[in-house]
Image (spheres, rainbow, N blue to C red):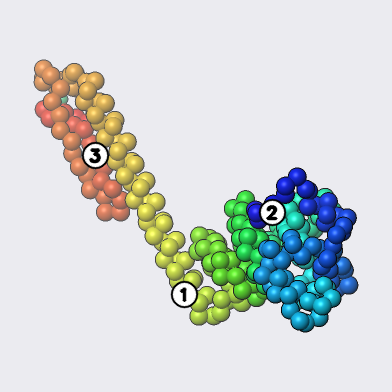
């Protein structure tokens, strides 16, 4: 959240009414009535623009053409509320998540452009949360492409790289991977992904084997503790004496057999 001081004033009212507005932002014909004290305290770029001798400084009008009006509206909402996407008039995207994460990338890009660090951080958090809530490799590819192309924010790029690394096994199967990172890097990722999958499988196999050995030994210990005599009626031994035979298995863990040390029968 951006530290917007409120002092009993709801800045959303100022934004809605445009009262005392002394700064206008125009994006593709749509006007946003802002206040220098709010906008310039949070954006060094707005501050420099209104203090300049250029047109913006003289007229109090800043034109934004490189972003779409919806993204500008989210920037403005953040400047006045410390968050975005909470306004009731927010349109519901058709393909909720695809558009959702791409919209956050655009917010991150405008925050990067105008130096509103807290907003860039918030947008990145929203992207991370969206992929945590619902992982989808196709959506990730579209979002990552937008992130690398539209935003210069290294923190966002780093977050996208981390998400990619965590979901490598899924991503190496996507044909769009080459498009995103290039032929050579995609090949490296595919080999790495295969190696990783093999390691995981080996690890899982070893863990299951260990679990079987542990379970078998628990049963053997239980058997030794409870048994007083050999189960073989013909066995002449007065008390139960036993040993454990190890049978090696070339493709897995050894098996263990509990035997009476006198008649050699299995228990
Ligand atoms: Zn016996």
Quickly name the residue at label 2.
4
Q: Is mark 2 within 8 Å of ligand 1?
A: no
The image position of residue 74, as x and y in percent, is 76, 61
Quickly name the residue at label 1.
188
Say whether marks 2 and 1 touch (CB < 8 Å): no
At 29% from the left edge and 30% from the top edge, which residue is drawn?
Answer: 219
Indicate the secondary structure of the residue bearing disc 1.
helix
Decide: is 63 above or below 244.
below
Q: Nearer the viewer, residue 152 or 182?
A: 152
Q: Residues within 10 Å of mark 1 (few under 14, many from 20)?
A: few
Q: Earlier in the sequence, mark 1 or mark 3?
A: 1
Indicate the secondary structure of the residue bearing disc 3.
strand
Q: State the quadrant of the C terminus.
A: top left
The image position of residue 139, as x and y in percent, is 66, 63
Write down which quadrant ligand 1 falls in.
Answer: top left
Q: Earlier in the sequence, mark 2 or mark 3?
A: 2
Quickly name the residue at label 3.
256
Indicate the secondary structure of the residue bearing disc 2.
loop
Question: What is the quadrant of residue 77 in the picture?
Answer: bottom right
Q: Which of the two discs, 2 and 3, sits closer to the camera?
A: 2
Q: Earlier in the sequence, mark 2 or mark 1?
A: 2
């Amino acid at each position: 959240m951006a530290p917007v001081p409120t002092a009993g004033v709801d800045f959303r009212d100022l934004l809605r009414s445009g009262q005392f507005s002394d700064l206008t932002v125009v994006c593709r014909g749509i006007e946003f009535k802002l206040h220098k004290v709010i906008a310039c305290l949070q954006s060094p770029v707005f501050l420099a623009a209104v203090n300049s001798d250029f047109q913006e400084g003289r007229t109090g009008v800043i034109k934004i053409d490189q972003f779409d009006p919806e993204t500008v509206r989210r920037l403005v909402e953040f400047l006045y509320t410390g968050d975005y996407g909470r306004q009731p008039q927010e349109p519901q995207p058709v393909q909720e998540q695809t558009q959702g994460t791409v919209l956050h990338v655009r917010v991150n890009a405008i925050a990067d452009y105008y130096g509103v660090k807290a907003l860039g951080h918030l947008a990145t958090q929203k992207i991370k949360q969206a992929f945590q809530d619902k992982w989808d490799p196709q959506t990730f590819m579209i979002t990552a492409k937008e992130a690398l192309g539209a935003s210069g924010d290294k923190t966002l790029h780093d977050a996208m790289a981390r998400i990619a690394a965590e979901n490598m096994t899924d991503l190496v199967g996507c044909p769009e991977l080459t498009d995103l990172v290039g032929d050579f890097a995609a090949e490296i990722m595919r080999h790495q992904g295969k190696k990783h999958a093999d390691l995981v499988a080996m690890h899982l196999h070893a863990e299951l084997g260990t679990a079987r050995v542990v379970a078998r030994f628990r049963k053997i210990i239980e058997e030794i503790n409870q048994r007083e005599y050999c189960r073989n009626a013909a066995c002449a031994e007065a008390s139960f004496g036993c040993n454990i035979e190890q049978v090696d298995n070339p493709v897995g863990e050894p098996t263990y057999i509990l035997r009476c040390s006198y008649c050699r029968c299995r228990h």
